[in-house]
Image (cartoon, rainbow, N blue to C red):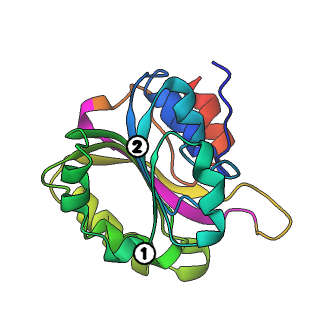
Amino acid sequence: MNLPYQSHALQDCFVANILNFKRNGFFIDIGACHAVSANNSYALEALDWSGICIEIDSQHNKSFEGRKCEYINGDATKIDYPKLLWELAAPKVIDYLSLDIDALSTQVLKKLPLDKYIFTIITIEHDEYHLGNIYRNEQREILLKNGDYVLYCPDVLVPVQPDTQPDSAFEDWYLHKSILPKIQMNARMYPKDIITALQ
């Protein structure tokens, strides 16, 4: 299906393919940045998804005027997520969580009610290529400790561009154990190769 993909590293394409282009899903996009450009959830609204976008930089506020999602201009590290999800009547199974706020991604992960909600797909930034293992290891400990999540694409590589070195790992992509596909993925793959393998 030809969706208006905008993610910098094909996260939106990954989600759509893993979920077989599911309609009426729900997302939480933390560190959404611009509403369209390089946005991880914009394309999913073409499948009638709803969700929540959170972005601290107010310069992007106007860009969200055409989006269907609930938009919050605020500090993601200071949000009471159980309260927010209850107030917005979020479903207990959230199809996609995008956590993309650099070194603060781990801090926000600790605030999410992982014991009360299922997050079917999680893409989370750890920036190992310039921050080392400190955030990546802690994220993995949190998400893997109870056995509900599987690290499906470890150390996804930054798409090659002029200002990055080859083989630069920047994110981990997790799946809830309930939706594991038969296709296996290797560590340290480029996004385009992951998508090719899924198709």
- Highlighted magenta segment, given as a residue range: 166-178
Q: How many marks?
A: 2
For the point 59% across and 51% down, which residue is it? 64
Q: Is residue 166 left or right of residue 13?
A: right
Which residue is painted at 48% across and 78% down in the image?
103
- The residue that disc 2 covers is 51
Badge 2 vs badge 1, beta-carbon distance below 8 Å: no
Q: Write the residue at 57% across / 64% down.
A: 170
Crowding near the residue tagged with mark 1, few <14, some 14–19, many ≥20 C-alpha atoms within 10 Å: few
Residue 32's x, y, as percent? 54, 58
Q: Is the magenta stretch mostly helix, strand or loop?
A: strand
**Which quarter of the rendering shows the N terminus?**
top right
Quadrant housing the C terminus: top right
- Label 1 belongs to which residue? 75
The correct choice, above or below, for 43 with respect to 112 in the image is above
As drawn, 100 above or below 120: below
> Label 2 crowding class (10 Å Cα cut-off): few <14, some 14-19, many 20+?
many
Give the structural element (helix, strand or loop) at label 1: loop
Local SS, label 2: strand
Question: Which is more toward the observer, 116 or 69?
Answer: 69
Q: How far apart are marks 2 and 1 (CA)?
A: 17 Å
Residue drawn at x 26%, y 70% is 110
Task: Say if residue 83 shows up in the picture.
Answer: yes
Residue 42 pos. (x, y %): 58, 41
Kindly identify the amino acid type of the residue bearing the numbered disc 1: Asp
Q: In this view, does 162 lie to the left or right of 97?
A: right
Residue 86 forms part of the magenta stretch: no
